[in-house]
């Protein structure tokens, strides 16, 4: 907790805000200056090292980073951060407990992508928590992988989780398995495991493609409690249909922060929510301006309101 | 502790490099002698991608060793289902043998010049590919069972889903176009409306469906960005098995 006087600006927060403004200064200058003055002045200098077509992405990146870092700092100095309950994540411990009571294993599939996919990293973060809990409860875990790099990383994650849980003796190499690189051979192997070994809990967390439906449907027939999480839009309906709990998009990325309850990580979720609020406000304003422009000048309006609304949409659509 | 620190430093460098390559692709990485003067953030980021393929190649060896160890142990102990392990190792070794045989200059792993198959190609085309296609084909049946469960009328939302699904399914097939004029006439009492169901289908897909999807995409993109930032800054270490929980 902080011992600073309430209402006084934290110097680190002031520093983050200052650096962000400094980074955005060229963009602000470009907005204010006439196009000709920009081109004959600082324009070519910035274009010599900066990818100008990514300007709107850069602005969003700076605003996003600064809000996340400020939220993290606020969490560090003791601000109270509320994160809404997520049913799928509350059920993680329940599923592990159920498997332990039944004396059956827990099947964890960290998606089918490699370590260059952010969903896989998010999945391994959840795996760290699941492995720690299985180590504490003495439950049996089976992490099955398609990608060799993910397999190597998952093995280290589980090993470290068992050490941190104070049960290094309980770790066995057979807890983390490599299956195959082929998508459908992997699906056959996993569905076979579900039917023959009847795990009590299935975790499908990560990036999945067409195999998602088959895994979830077969798992559903075995009566296991199923928790899925992915950001793959096309696979979400299948998981929602066949699993007990589904972490949708951002819930899935927030999982590790939510499970660990670490204030620093929760702070970043809060920052992310602030940016989402900003994007929403921007979209609502743009939509309102489009409607206003259409109402006042017709569909082909070229007035200042229409131009502003078009600019607002183009900034977000990265054109 | 040291091992963890090295992992975090490498993560920071690799993550930052990707970011810098996106915004400042042409900026030289090391603009001083004796480093390569032409190396910039973009080329360094591309080089990292190449390294990843090489590292993945080595990791594949780890995977194969794990498969042989796991299934070899199952066979030795004659655990439940050990015959499946025999089939798996048989497949692994025969395919590997065919691939190694193909290393000879006159062989290869495709087809011979007369159009006949090499051993590798024969196994792939006559055993592996049909098995793969069979698994893929099963999806249709699983889709039907999932649809049945989803469309059962249990609540208002499920009813809405069923109605939308029926409209979209009908609107995407010729039968939908065929019944559209009759449907339109029975509703409005006047002829016309030849493309009622396809129009409704497009409206559902373009408006409510697209709006819902956009919401999920925006949330997921921000979530991914926040997670990436946490990983690059070393705040998120649970993927290394090191959480902050007690």
Image: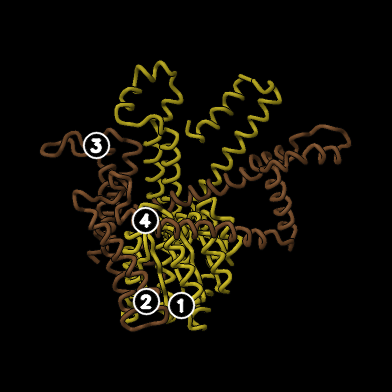
For the residues labelled 1 and 3, the Cα–Cα distance comes to: 49 Å
Which residue is located at x 40 percent, y 46 percent? A14
Count residues near mark 3 (Cα–Cα under 10 Å), then give few for <14, some for 14-19, many for 20+: many
Sooner in the amino-acid sequence: mark 4 or mark 3: 3
Parent chain of label 2: A
Residue A141 image-quadrant placement: bottom left
From the image, state whether disc 2 or disc 3 is nearer to you.
3
Parent chain of label 1: A
Which residue is located at x 31 percent, y 67 percent? A156
Q: Residue furthest right?
A: B189
The location of residue A130, given as percent across then percent down, is: 44, 71
For the residues labelled 4 and 2, the Cα–Cα distance comes to: 45 Å
Count residues near mark 4 (Cα–Cα under 10 Å), then give few for <14, some for 14-19, many for 20+: some
Figure check: B67 above or below A64? below
From the image, state whether disc 1 or disc 4 is nearer to you.
4
Identify the secondary structure beneath mark 3: loop
Chain B tint in image: brown
Q: Is there a contact, CB below 8 Å, between mark 2 and mark 1?
A: no
Residues beneath discs 2 and 3 located on the same chain: no
Q: Which residue does the numbered mark 2 point to in the structure image? A: A165
Position of B29 with respect to A275 (left or right) is: left
């Amino acid at each position: 907790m902080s011992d600073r006087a309430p209402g006084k600006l934290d110097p680190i927060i002031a520093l983050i805000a200052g650096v962000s403004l400094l980074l955005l200064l060229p963009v602000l200058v470009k907005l204010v200056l006439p196009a000709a003055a920009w081109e004959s002045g600082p324009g070519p200098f910035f274009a010599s090292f900066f990818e100008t077509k990514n300007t709107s992405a850069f602005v969003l990146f700076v605003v996003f980073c600064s809000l996340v870092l400020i939220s993290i700092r606020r969490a560090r100095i003791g601000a109270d951060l509320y994160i809404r309950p997520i049913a799928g994540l509350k059920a993680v411990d329940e599923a592990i407990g159920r498997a332990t009571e039944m004396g059956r294993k827990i099947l964890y599939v960290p998606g089918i992508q490699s370590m260059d996919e952010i969903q896989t990293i998010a999945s391994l973060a959840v795996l760290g928590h699941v492995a720690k809990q299985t180590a504490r409860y003495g439950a049996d875990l089976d992490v099955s992988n398609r990608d060799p790099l993910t397999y190597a990383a998952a093995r280290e994650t589980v090993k470290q989780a068992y050490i941190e849980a104070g049960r290094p003796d309980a770790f066995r190499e057979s807890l983390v398995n490599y299956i195959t690189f082929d998508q459908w051979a992997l699906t056959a192997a996993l569905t076979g495991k579900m039917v023959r070994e009847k795990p009590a809990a299935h975790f499908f967390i990560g990036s999945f493609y067409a195999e998602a439906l088959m895994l979830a449907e077969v798992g559903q027939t075995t009566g296991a409690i199923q928790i899925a999480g992915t950001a793959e839009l096309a696979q979400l309906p299948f998981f929602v249909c066949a699993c007990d709990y589904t972490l949708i998009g951002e819930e899935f990325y927030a999982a590790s922060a939510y499970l660990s309850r670490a204030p620093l990580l929760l702070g970043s979720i809060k920052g992310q929510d602030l940016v989402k609020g900003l994007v929403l406000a921007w979209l609502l304003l743009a939509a309102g301006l489009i409607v206003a422009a259409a109402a006042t000048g017709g569909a082909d309006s070229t007035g200042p309101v229409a131009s502003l609304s078009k600019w607002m949409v183009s900034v977000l659509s990265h054109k | 502790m040291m091992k963890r620190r090295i992992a975090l430093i490498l993560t920071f460098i690799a993550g930052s490099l990707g970011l810098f390559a996106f915004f400042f692709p042409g900026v030289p990485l090391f603009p001083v002698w004796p480093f390569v003067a032409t190396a910039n953030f973009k080329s360094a980021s591309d080089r990292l991608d190449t390294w990843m393929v090489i590292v993945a190649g080595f990791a594949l060896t780890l995977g194969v060793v794990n498969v042989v160890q796991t299934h070899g142990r199952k066979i030795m102990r004659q655990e439940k289902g050990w015959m499946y392990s025999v089939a798996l190792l048989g497949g692994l070794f025969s395919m590997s043998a065919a691939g190694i045989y193909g290393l000879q200059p006159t062989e290869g792993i495709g087809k011979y010049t007369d159009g006949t198959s090499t051993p590798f190609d024969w196994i792939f085309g006559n055993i592996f590919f049909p098995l793969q296609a069979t698994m893929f084909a099963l999806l249709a049946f699983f889709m039907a069972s999932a649809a049945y469960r989803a469309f059962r009328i249990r609540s208002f939302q499920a009813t809405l889903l069923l109605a939308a699904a029926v409209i979209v399914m009908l609107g995407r097939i010729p039968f939908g176009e065929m019944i559209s004029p009759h449907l339109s006439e029975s509703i409005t009492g006047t002829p016309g409306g030849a493309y009622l169901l396809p129009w409704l289908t497009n409206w559902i897909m373009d408006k409510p469906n697209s709006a819902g999807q956009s919401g999920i995409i925006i949330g997921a993109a921000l979530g991914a960005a926040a997670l990436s930032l946490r990983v690059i800054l070393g705040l998120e270490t649970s993927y290394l098995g090191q959480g902050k929980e007690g």
